[in-house]
Image (spheres, grey):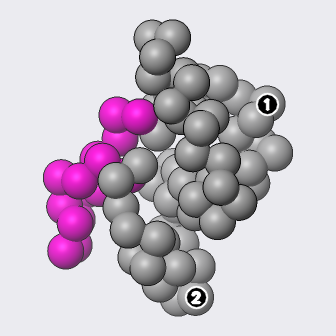
Amino acid sequence: MAEQAHGNPELLKELLHYQMPFGKYKGTLLRALPVSYLEWFAQKGFPAGKLGMLLQTMYEIKLNGLDYLLDGIRKNT
């Protein structure tokens, strides 16, 4: 999934502004979600659709220490 993000800068830009639409972290930016919450989704299953893709991408980014990708995009926007 991180490979998909690497090839799609628009997806990475979206991760900067997309908010969690439900649950304990409703209104929290996906990039600010704790890794433990993303791990829970990885174990239980990511939601379908765009939200699931974004959550899975964020999980891969955090899991692999690639947060700098988002930091670099934020500085350039």
Q: Which residue is drawn at 46% across and 16% down?
A: 75
Q: In which quarter of the image is the C terminus?
A: top left
Q: Does the magenta stretch include residue 18?
A: yes
* Mark 1 vs 2, N-terminal side: 1
Q: In this view, does 36 lie to the left or right of 58?
A: left
Q: Considering only vertical position in the picture, is 8 above or below 33?
A: above
Q: In which quarter of the image is residue 43?
A: bottom right
Q: Considering only vertical position in the picture, is 37 above or below 69?
A: below
Q: Does the magenta stretch include residue 43?
A: no
Discs 1, 2 touching: Cβ within 8 Å: no
Q: Is residue 56 left or right of residue 14?
A: right
Q: Could you say whether the residue bearing mark 2 is in a helix, strand or loop?
A: helix
Instruction: Tell me the amino acid under the disc marked 2.
Output: Gln
Q: Residue at x 57, y 45 (%)?
A: 67
Q: Which residue lies furthest to the top in this view?
A: 76
Residue 42: where, in percent of width, then height? 58, 79
Judging by the rendered image, the residue that carries numbered circle 1 is 7
Instruction: Tell me the amino acid under the disc marked 1.
Output: Gly
